[in-house]
Amino acid sequence: MSAWRGVEEFLAVVSAGSFTGAAEELGVSKSFVSKTVNELEARLGTQLLIRTTRRLSLTAAGEIFHEQCHALQERLVEIEQRVTQFQSAPVGRLRIGLSDIFGTDYMSALLADFSALHPDIVIEPVAYLHESDVQQERFDVVIRYGRLPDSAAKARLFGYLSYCLCASPDYVREHGWPSSAEEVSQHQCLTDATGAFEFNGGDRVRLKGRWKSNSGVALRWAARRGLGLAHLPVSVIRADLAGGNILACDAEWSFHDKEVWVVFSPGIMPAATRSFIDFLAARFTKQKIRPWDWPRMSPTNYPHGIVHEQA
């Protein structure tokens, strides 16, 4: 039996001054109110109300019980109002899971922009290395890439993580670009932990490279030092493209566009979560990014970072 059963009826009787008034206030029958209050007194083992034909009054125990329960009732109303704020305005905590392989740098910049717009939200980005590390219930949202595992969570596509074939200027001058996915295996390659490059169209080339890492930062530095070809997200190497430290092949076969999803638990969505998802949707146009899109320039007027396949 609920510990609160009978308390609401008791408080209503005291407030209204009668069982009849309490019944009208609560929208129930007088007999129900009387029965419930009697059950409450029996459960407590003490009398709370002195009933006479003319009036009701509180016993000493009833006065203490009424004072404490009335305070609890007011506190409950206050709590409900505070919780309702989570639905009406973007406030509270937002815990976000980010991939530590390629997602932290660019996504963290977006989070900083979002936080500047919503100072009442406490942002908690948490990095993960593998999809298997993620327990969805620990997060308000998780940023995931590629094919989603089967789960009860809900997801919204908001963009793409576009990989490009890239290398240092010295490496390109000495070795050139491969002309097809099959030729990639003839090059020194810098791979992630899978040891493979994936391309649009379903091509997946397994490679034996001199450098393998689960860190996008490590692969970017290896590419900058001329250690081989890398297949990295444009967002990871955007500064290197602009500075000419890394060049990107513009052959369409060489790209791989992974879907980027924001994944969240089913149920009533807090306003903070809804605001973040809407923010991501507004910042992305669901288009596939190419190196000359960062900054927004065409291949013909990009200053440093594009080398055509035949170069």
Image: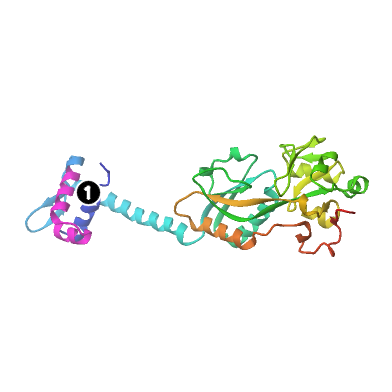
Rendering coords of residue 293 (x, y %): 76, 61
Q: Nearer the viewer, residue 157 or 244?
A: 157
Q: Which residues are magenta?
A: 19-41
Quadrant into which the N terminus falls: top left
Q: Is residue 192 left or right of residue 150?
A: right
Q: Is residue 256 placed above or below 281 in the rendered structure? A: above
Q: Secondary structure at mark 1?
A: loop
Q: Quadrant of residue 16?
A: bottom left
Residue for point 21% across, 53% down: 9
Residue 106: x %, y % from top left: 69, 53
Q: Around disc 1, counting alpha carbons within 10 Å, would you say few (fewer than 14), some (14 to 19), or many (20 or more)?
A: many
- Residue at 68% x, 55% y: name it: 109
- Residue 180 in the figure: left or right of residue 153: right
Quarter of the figure that contains the C terminus:
bottom right
Magenta-colored stretch includes residue 148: no
Q: Nearer the viewer, residue 302 or 133?
A: 302
Residue drawn at x 80%, y 54% as measured from the top left? 251
* Chief secondary structure of the magenta portion: helix
Compared to residue 23, the image places residue 64 above or below, namely above
Mark 1 lies on residue: 6
Q: Amino acid at mark 1?
A: Gly
Is residue 128 among the parts visible in the rendering?
yes
